[in-house]
Amino acid sequence: MTNTGRLIVLTGPSGVGKGTLLKQLLQHCPDLYLSISATTRPPRPGEIEGKQYYFLTKAQFQDRIDQDQLLEWAEYAGNFYGTLRDPVIQEVNQGHKVILEIELVGARQVRQKVPEAFQIFINPPSWSALETRIRGRGQDSETAIARRLDQAKVELAAADEFDFQLVNDDLDTALQELKAKVLSL
Ligand code: ADP
Ligand code: 5GP
């Protein structure tokens, strides 16, 4: 019998704490696999090629699209982001849970292509908390922050499309909720 894993999508507005939650979740659940996306966004200080992302030029990203190597992709705040299909499929086929941390347009594509994927949405406790977190991260320009906040409104309005929602208010509480849900899948 084939040991089939599970695809899990994690979405939520920029600055809500997806990266923070995932980093801790992976420490608690070492058998989870986090998909490394490709992007045309420039690396932030401290980001490493192949760790947070594969950083590509627009031409390289277009090649991945043309060669049908992406499970999903989207333009977000002026840059392209996409999930490389093969490593994800390989891990799922080996029986692992694979998490995609992706924005709304990509999450919708996965919903169409992989209906059995479980989709989780992370909410902020309030709009002002979200704004404070994006600015507090201190890694995006004012223009990038403004685009992310605009996009956040669109994403928050789509939260009900997801299978499961949680609020990242107290980090430890949100982490426990996320962990319990992921382990239950
Ligand atoms: P995302 O990956 O969703 O864009 P990050 O994980 O980069 O968000 O978090 C954005 C900022 O918010 C970071 O500075 C992080 O330390 C902070 N943060 C994350 N979760 C919480 C929380 N529960 N309470 C307060 N600050 C948080
Ligand atoms: P950031 O630039 O802050 O790292 O990411 C911006 C947005 O792109 C976030 O909402 C993040 O979830 C999303 N993102 C990251 N990788 C992918 C991907 O492979 N596909 C899609 N559709 N979105 C992604």
Image (cartoon, rainbow, N blue to C red):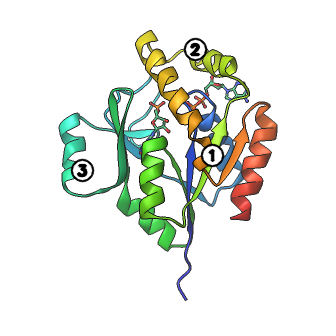
Would you call the spot at circle 1 few (<14 residues within 10 Å), some (14-19), or many (20 or more)? few
Q: Quadrant of ligand 1?
A: top right
Residue 64: percent from the left, percent from the top?
A: 24, 50
State the quadrant of the N terminus. bottom right
Report whether residue 36 is seen.
no
In this picture, is 94 found above or below 134? Answer: below
Residue 46: percent from the left, percent from the top?
A: 47, 26
In this picture, is 83 found above or below 54? Answer: below
Q: Is residue 60 left or right of residue 33?
A: left
Tag 2: amino acid:
Arg
Looking at marks 3 and 2 on the same chain, the residue that comes earlier in the sequence is marked by 3
Quote the CA–CA distance across marks 3 and 1. 31 Å
The residue located at (76%, 33%) in the rendering is: 171
The residue located at (50%, 65%) in the rendering is: 115
Tag 1: amino acid:
Asp
Q: Image quadrant of residue 22?
A: top right
Q: Secondary structure at mark 1?
A: helix
Residue where numbered disc 2 is placed:
135
Q: Is residue 87 left or right of residue 126?
A: left
Residue where numbered disc 3 is placed:
64
Of marks 3 and 1, the one in the foreground: 1
Q: Secondary structure at mark 2?
A: helix
Q: Nearer the viewer, residue 76 or 56?
A: 76
